[in-house]
Amino acid sequence: MTNIHEGNQSTITKFILLGFGDLPQLHILLFLLFLVIYIVTMAGNILVIVLVVTDQHLHTPMYFFLGNLSCLETCCTSTILPRVLASLLTGDRSISVMGCITQFYFFGSLAGTECLLLSVMSYDRYLAICKPLHYATRMNGRLCLQLVVGLWIGGFMSVSIFIFMLSQLKFCAPNEIDHFFCDFHPITKLSCTDTHIVEAAGLISCAMFTLPPFVLTVASYVYIISNIMRIPSTAGRQKAFSTCSSHLIVVTIYYGTLILVYLLSDSDALRDLNQVFSVFYGVLTPLVNPLIYSLRNKEVKKALRKALLRSFVFFRNSNF
C-alpha cells in the first residue's frame, strides 16, 4: 500500500475489501458457488435478450423493456462478481480508491436505472390492463425507445454529482471496507474529511431517482389490482393478473432487498446481516429475474422452445 504522508495522517490509495475474509476455510466453496451463480445469471439474462431480439412474437413494449431489464442485470452482476471471484481465488482483496469509486459509480447508476425501468414497466402494464383501447397508440415503438434512452441516461446521471464529490474526499487509515464490494456508506466511513455535504447530496440524489419511480410503481399496481378485481369472471381475473404477476414479483424482490440493505441494515440489530442482504440485492436478484420471467411467462417459454427446436434442427442437419 502506497501512503502519502501529510503531517500525522497518511492518505491511502488502496482499500482492502474484507468481504468474506473471515471465512478462509470456505473460500474455495464460495468461489465455486459464486462462479455458478455468475454463469447462470449471465446465461439466463443473455438468453432472454437473444429471445427478445430474435423472436418476432416478442417484439412488443413489454418484452422490449424485459430485454433492457436483462441487459441491466447482466451489467449489474458484472460490476460485482468478477472482482469477488478474483479475490476469493487469489486472496488479493485490495482495490485502488478510484477503482472502488468507479465500481460504486457503475453499481449505483445501474441500480438507479433499474428503479426507473421497473416504474416504466409497471406503467406499461397499467396501460395494457386498465387502458387497453389506448395501449397501442400510447405505448408505441418510438415512445418505448425514448423512455429507454431517457432512463439509461437518467440512471447514470443520478449519481454523477455526488460521485464527483466522493472522488474529492481524502481517505486515511484504516483502509479496510467491511464489505465484498464498494458501496456508498462503507466508502464514506473511511474518509478523514467532512462527508456531510457528500452524504446529503447522495441522499437527495437517491430520493429523487428512487422515490418517484417507487410511488409510480405502487400507484400503477393499485390501479391494476383494483381493475382486475372488478373483472366478473375468475378466468378473466387470472388471465389479467398473469400478464403482470412476473413483474410484480420482480418489483417486490427488488425493492424488498433494497429496503433491507439501505434502511434496515443500518440498525444495530441487523448491521451484521448487511452482507447477507447485499448478496440478495446485488447477486441473487439478477439471478432470479430471468428465471421468474421464463418460468411464469408463456410467451417466453414458447419462444425458448422454438429456439431450442431450431438449434436442434440446425445441429442435426450440420452433422449430415
Image (cartoon, rainbow, N blue to C red):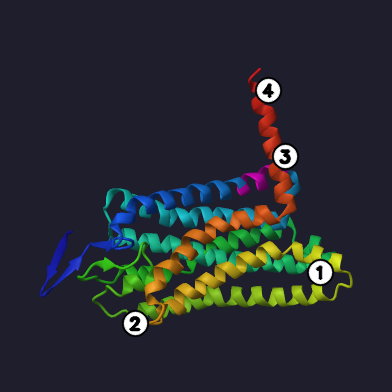
Residue extending farthest right: 232
The CA distance from mark 4 to mark 1 is 47 Å
Q: Earlier in the sequence, mark 2 or mark 3?
A: 2
Viewer-proximal residue among 316 and 29: 29
- In the rendered image, which residue does mark 1 sit on? 131
Q: CA distance from mark 3 to mark 1?
A: 31 Å
Looking at the picture, tell me which residue is in the foreground, 133 or 14. 14
Amino acid, disc 2: His
Seen at 37% across and 74% down, the residue is: 272
Q: Which residue type does callout 3 highlight? A: Lys
Q: Which mark is residue 317?
A: 4
Indicate the amino acid at tag 1. Answer: Lys
Provide the secondary structure element on which disc 4 rests: helix
At a point 51% along the width and 78% down the height, the residue shown is: 207
Against 39, is 246 above or below? below
Q: Which residues are magenta?
A: 48-55
Counting residues from the start of the chain, the first of labels 3 and 4 encountered is 3
Check contact, mark 2 vs mark 3: CB within 8 A. Answer: no
For disc 2, the marked residue is: 196
Quadrant position of the C terminus in the picture? top right
Front disc: 3 or 1: 3
